[in-house]
Image (cartoon, grey):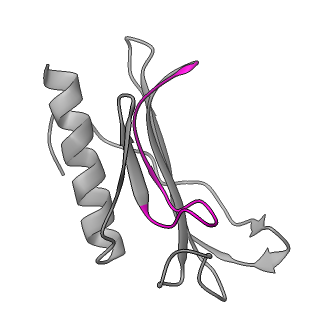
Amino acid sequence: MPSSVGSIDNTYVVGIIANMKATLLHRDRLDFDDGHIVEMVIWRVPQHVEGSSHPYKYRLFYGRSGKRIVSYDNERGKGDHRHVGSTEEPYTFKDVKTLVRDFLADVAKRRSS
């Protein structure tokens, strides 16, 4: 994990998404002193989200209240994609570890610029 992002707390618990039983795999939030936040939520779902071919539902966010700087998600129908600034582009999902690594690398780039 890039050291410029900081440490992230991993103490949250389970929930349900869209009436499907899901298992929470990862939920972290980091609040920076400058008002920015990193929030990552990753679920294992019983069937893939429409537009994705894997059993995960996720939303990874970096920004501040009312302003998204970087986010990755797999919204139903759109599949895996990322937002960087005002640009939205497809994201090639490999596995959860790579997803988190790619997201944190994008966050580190934006925090250092």
Query: Would residue 77 be found to the left or right of residue 113 on screen?
Result: right
- Residue at 45 percent across and 14 percent down: it is 35
Q: Residue furthest right?
A: 19
Magenta range = 66-80
Question: Is 108 situated above or below 20?
Answer: above
Q: Is residue 47 visible?
A: yes
Q: Quadrant of residue 48?
A: bottom right
Q: Nearer the viewer, residue 30 or 60?
A: 60
Residue sitting at x 50%, y 67% = 79
Q: Position of residue 36 (x, y in %)?
A: 42, 21
Q: Is residue 5 visible?
A: no
Please tell me in which quadrant of the rendered image residue 34 appears.
Answer: top left
Query: Residue 72 in magenta?
Result: yes
Query: Splitting the image into 4 quarters, where does residue 20 fall?
Result: bottom right
Placement of 85 over or under 22, stated as above or below: above
Q: Is residue 23 above or below residue 29?
A: below
Front-most of residues 75 and 58: 75
Residue 111: image x %, image y %? Answer: 22, 24
